[in-house]
Amino acid sequence: MNSEQNLQQAEQLLAAWNKETTHPEANRLDATIAADDLRLAVSALHNTHWGYLSAITGMDLGPDAGQMEALYHFCNGPAITTLRIRLPRTSDVSLPTIEDIIPPATFFERELHEMLGFRIEGGKSNERLFIPDDWPEDVYPLREDFKIEQAKPVEGRHADELPDEGVVGGNKFVIPIGPQHPALKEPGHFEFTVDGEIVTAASMRLGYAHRGIEKAAESRNWIQNLYLFERICGICSHTHAYAYSQGVEKLAQVEVPARAQAIRELVAGLERIHSHLLWLGVTAHEAGFDTLFMYSWRDRETVMNLLEQITGNRVNYSANVLGGVKADVGPEQAKAIKEGLNYLETRIRHYLEVVTTDTMFLNRTRGIGTISYEEAEEFGLLGPTARASGLLRDVRVEAPYGAYTRFPISGVTETNGDLEARCVVRLKELLVSCFALRTIVDNLPEGPLTTKMPRKVPAGETISRVEAPRGELFYYIKSNGTEHPARVHIRTPSLCNWVSVLEKAVGRQLADVPMLIAGMDPCFSCNDRLVTTVGTSGDRKTWSWKQLREYGIEYYKR
Amino acid sequence: MNTLTSLTSLLIFPAGLTLLLMGMLYEWTDRKLVARFQNRTGPRWFQPIADVVKLFAKEQITPGIKNPFLFFGLPIVAISGALTAALYVPLLGFTPAHSLPGDLIVTIYLLSLLTMCMGLAGWNTSSRFALVGATRALTQVFAYEAPFLLALLGPAMAAGSWQISVINDYAANHWFIISQPVGFIIALIGLMGKLELPPFDAPEAETEIVAGALTEYSGRGLAMFKIGKSVELVVGITLVSAFYLGGLHGILPFLAKTLGVLFVMTMFQVLLTRMRIDQTVGLWWRYGTILVLAQIVIIILLKGGLS
């Protein structure tokens, strides 16, 4: 079925509740429905397996318009159906929950609640997931009339306190992992209730690295935002810039030159090699196989050197500009890339052999955390985590964008769905990437690197999807015709994959938990966290950047 | 005079200072070899000494503990157990400082003291990581202790004595690694279990339970546990090589044989993935114990047949 037929089918499914239909872009259907019909409409799409819920975008249209919007985006290949719900902007904006229909929606709904103040009726959990515990009640950072003065920390509000040394009755007790823990390179907090060695319950808390990037984007211009979004994640910085610039270029109706698109795919491919080799090392370390960890990170240096040769940077590559790329690949770089790829390919083949034949490593990966195809679909998994269960979720294959139409990628899937399959999928994907990258280097289209971009972007909204190393990266960008975006909503792939950890940890041994967390390749790249610290006098207060800097200088003088 | 000799043997040679330095040297060899195998540079030769000096100079934090007496006493007991055990083994190829019939059993139990102390230390704090670490350490004791003992019993039975010095002399003419290869492998792997080296490092798996039983220890206490462990490394290797590698007589053969054993142990550390605690227990009781028991039975039958 092509995307047009898909959209027609969706339109028919939604006909009963549909109030207004538009087609903002060729591959999109925008259906406005009433809040009361939401559950029926979602069920209709879900029951017929029309795609999957990719993200929920919340928007405050401001006090003047007096309206709030919630957009439920369903993706089915290249086709996207958006359920748009408009609600009057009052003190009580409520939506029915859909988490009983689609479990992963719980993360999106909690984000809606915490950031914009939508009250989710019937939601199971009201605990905070993203914003700090001492954030004041009824203050929502993404509302248009939010002022920074409102964000005063509330004294004594800490939900994190554990009862009596974490003992929860009988022989059970809670093992906290994070926000500071040797297993996590980034901050997140998990609580695993264990009975001896067996995990009986799991919960998590995010937001320790929230930097308010979505909010910050609204006050910066289109070009500044490119550099802001690049810094969401250190590992997939190119993917974020790729998704953002692709979206803005679509809005501005600018055609990116073929050479620029090919170079974007080239950098994305190298970034994937970098990311997956890093992941392999982390997983090996969690399993206690440090030799593999050291070797794969040594080989990662090769790909980082290549990226440095092309873009000048090892981490935040900054290869993109709006309307093209700023890094060219000359004959010298092409030669270096090919040599590097040859070396990497032999190493990747070797690692593939190690993860499939090393008995001791297989003891820790085979049959652990198995997710079936049906479960993967139900949990709404993305990227390699889904592909390991046989569910082909790969934007590059499902909805080719940019240069992927010219240099296509073949999708890699495995059927077992355990940790071994997740290792194999990622490594095989790298072999596919190596092949594609060689083709690109050999057939790089001639032409300019950039086109001219207007400073103001015409009003409109668009969705830009890019396959990050961890799965589908979703950008919703809305412009109101000025130099600044009106709203940018980012849904990172890791957010969708958390369910796989929380559901699968229960009943397993504590020793498997770090492996499960690593198995989905978590990336804590989210947004918004206030800097609060306990001052020397013991009082909690918000510190300004200047104060923090002075405090740091004073601290190290002693 | 006798007291003076005893004190010297306890404080300077072979136990005491010499042993501490040897422990650190062997620890460095182990770390350096592992690092080189893993494509790293590894520590400089004085790093273990620097670590200990640094730890002794640091503040010892006393966290929420159940029994302060145990908290401060356990590291001392652990290190004295390891040092005392050294008196009964042919360290540096010399005859053991002390020798009595049945000292093999005494030594093995003195070597277990460290693990027991770590188990108690974990139980004594209110840290949940330490508690899980202690549980795992003690579970693991039940897995490897019996096969390790049985593996050392093989040469003892062949030599007809439970006295380490007698077995050491007997082994000079009988390389038990050839006649009892299974026993050697199990003794070696059992020793790695005792020392909680990878792949048996589940009790201190940093990715799950931070530093295991010793999570709450810092400063002096941690330093003493660390020294105890490196001493136990030397004593354990000495014991295994004395029994299985033709006895230890003279400094050069001692160094060659013990460092050879250490080299094999680092290979295991580098090549193997950490085992879960259930896998460790399963390995020992399903394979280790049964194999070594079979060997013991064969020795008994052969001995009986010969006499």
Image (cartoon, coloured by chain):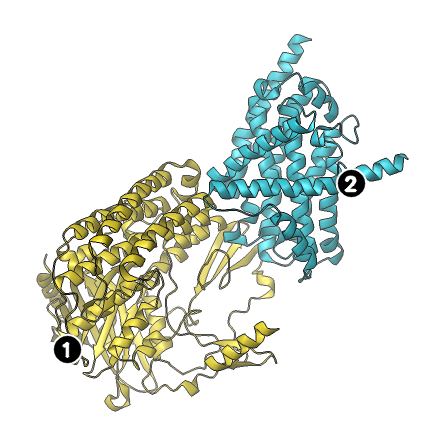
| Apparent side of residue B223 relative to residue A440 in the rendered image (left or right) | right
Q: Is residue A69 above or below residue A401?
A: below
Q: What's the residue at 82%, 39% (across, down)? A: B8
Q: Position of residue A434 (x, y in %)?
A: 24, 48
Q: Locate the C terminus of chain A by quadrant.
A: bottom right
The residue to which callout 1 is attached is A19
Q: Residues within 10 Å of mark 2 (few under 14, many from 20)?
A: some
Q: Is residue A558 above or below residue B121?
A: below
Q: What's the residue at 52%, 54% (across, down)? A: A194
Along the line of sight, which residue is nearer the eye, A195 or A401? A401
Q: Amino acid at mark 1?
A: Lys
Q: Is residue A388 above or below residue A226?
A: above
Along the line of sight, which residue is nearer the eye, A35 or B79? B79
The residue to which callout 2 is attached is B12
Q: Chain of mark 2?
A: B
Q: Is residue A505 above or below residue B23?
A: below
- Residue A108 image-quadrant placement: bottom left
Q: Amino acid at mark 2?
A: Ile
- Residue A456 image-quadrant placement: bottom left
Assign a secondary structure to mark 2. loop
Assign a secondary structure to mark 1. loop
Q: Position of residue B194 (x, y in %)?
A: 61, 39
Chain A appears in which tint?
Answer: yellow
Residue A14 visible in the displayed image:
yes
The chain coloured cyan in the image? B
CA–CA distance in space, label 1 to label 2? 91 Å
The lab-note entry on whether marks 1 and 2 share a chain reads no
| Apparent side of residue B153 relative to residue A321 in the rendered image (left or right) | right
Q: What's the residue at 16%, 50% (across, down)? A: A442
